[in-house]
Amino acid sequence: MNGPMSGAVITGIGCVTPIGIGVDSFSEALRHGISGVGPLTAMDATPYRCRVAAEVKGFEPLDFMPMREARSSPRVVQFAVAASRLALDHAGIRRSIDSTRTGVVLGTSVGPSAYNFEQFAVFIERGVRRIPPGFPAQAHYGVLASECAIQLDLHGPALSVSSACTSGADAIGMARAMILAGMADVVIAGGAEAPICPLLFAAFDRLDMMPTHFNDDPATASRPFAADRDGFVLGEGSAVFVVESEEHARARGARVLAVVAGYGATCDAKSHFSQDEGGDDAERAIRLALAMANVAPARIDYVNAHGSATRQNDPFETAVFRRVFGADAPAIPVSSSKSLFGHLLGASGAVEVAATLAAMEHRFLPPTLNLRARDPDCDLDYVPNASRPGAIDAALSTSFGFGSRNAALVLKRCGDEAHG
Amino acid sequence: MADPRTTETVIRLIAIELDIPPAEVRKASSLRRDLKVDSVAAANLLFALEEEYAVDLDLERVDKLDTVDDIATLVERSIGSKADRVNDGSDEREQ
């Protein structure tokens, strides 16, 4: 630890994502702009107009859990457990912590819904006797946190947070709050999602929220901030962090990756779907996070945007950034990592924090891929098409979600002038 | 006594359910006394066997079983009676 810190710090990252499993491969793909979007292969793609997805490839549950859990748990839980184990390994504290002072807070939007739909289909087709006895224990959203607690032997609070596409950011914000409130010394926090299933895919397809024009060239399908953007690419995966108190991290000589300096959450309380066009509550969430972090807007070096690539979001978000950053806005790099790994719904905020931390550590600005056709209403520096070198001392990550929710996190690099 | 192949499958599924090495499960092991199989584990094991052999096991009789060999024997009887039903055309669901 190199300098003053405040409160809750991140000391470990675990990633199970469409662009890599493990933080090293994730960081490399991010830096090199390697897309994780491909043809939809997890199910029959023919009924849908959109036939691309950001799937996690090469994931082997048995690498992270016993056969019993690998056979019985939903994919979203497997992602969460795997990312949690990777985070603890990365933080180097697998066995040495007081498990009674270690909690779990995991965000998810649709949780085990895909698994539940699958079991419902089995029930309809094959009857009562074919429903697994363990189904009730796996069918609820709380299973994400409890299964991680069980498998990692953690005895503090075990909470699942479900707040649509802000879930992952909210979970990290809640972890910070719990640590500052003295509820835990360590919180395993992040998000997980496995939404690629026929019913949800059909729903988003019908809502016209996913791209339909790039089925033949999937890697170009996610086009945040571009004039020819066509919706979000549905993604899956998980990112989980070891968040711990500054004192706890200091006492065990941990390598601190960043301070979770500020968190703001608001709700427009108007639409079931998107943000209110005025953007007042979205702006307020960002300003709350900045104020909590004691960081002036002009000191933000990088923004990892929600950048969902829907028609509505990207100009809306750009306008909000212009209001927050004022005359400084054009000089602040903003990128959407969804251009690489799609939209992981409730895990997106967490995976985007992982992207931000990777950029902070390795001193580069992550790209927004597929940004060639410029939209006059999206006129900031989105780090188009390729990453570039850049030091980040203080970063903002934004998430917006169904129910008109807004969440913002401010992350500060440890041991530099960003503190204070 | 059950066919060794059936016993081996039962032992494999018990080991998975209890997350223990198969070597710790023997033909004569008592499910409750030796292996500490509780009601949830028993239900999961039953389900796994039904999926493995595509049969419905008689829940009333399962409660009365004690050893691994008892389970394997019940599985074989269920497979046999299912085959009989299929052969005489009485089990339409399986056809």
Image: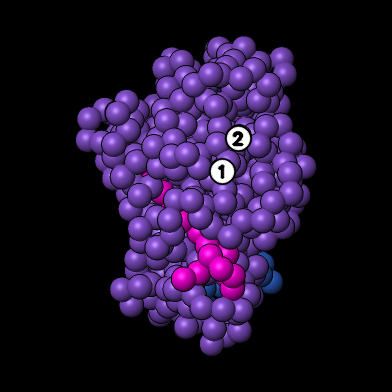
Magenta-colored stretch includes residue A58: no
Q: Nearer the viewer, residue B60 or A323?
A: A323
Rendering coords of residue A257 (x, y %): 60, 67
Q: Image point 58% across, 41% down: which residue?
A: A331
* Left or right, residue A24 beside residue A212: right
**Helix, strand or loop at disc 2?**
loop
For chain A, give the colour. purple
The answer to whether the residues at label 1 and label 2 have Cβ atoms under 8 Å apart is yes
Question: Are the residues under badges 1 and 2 in a single subunit?
Answer: yes
**Helix, strand or loop at disc 1?**
loop
Rendering coords of residue A413 (x, y %): 57, 64
Q: Chain of mark 1?
A: A
Image-quadrant location for residue A223: top right
Q: Kindly identify the amino acid type of the residue bearing the numbered disc 2.
A: Asp
Q: Image point 42% across, 22% down: which residue?
A: A312
Q: Nearer the viewer, residue A28 or A100?
A: A28
The residue pinned by badge 2 equals A381
Magenta-colored stretch includes residue A409: yes
**Magenta segment boundaries in residue numbering:** A405-420
For marks 1 and 2, give the CA distance. Answer: 7 Å
Q: Image point 50% across, 42% down: which residue?
A: A328
For chain B, give the colour. blue
* Left or right, residue B65 beside residue A52: left
Q: Which mark is residue A332?
A: 1
Q: Residues within 10 Å of mark 1 (few under 14, many from 20)?
A: many
- In the rendered view, would you say B89 is above or below B2? above
Q: Kindly identify the amino acid type of the residue bearing the numbered disc 1.
A: Ile
Residue ranking furthest to the front: A327
Q: Nearer the viewer, residue A176 or A75?
A: A176
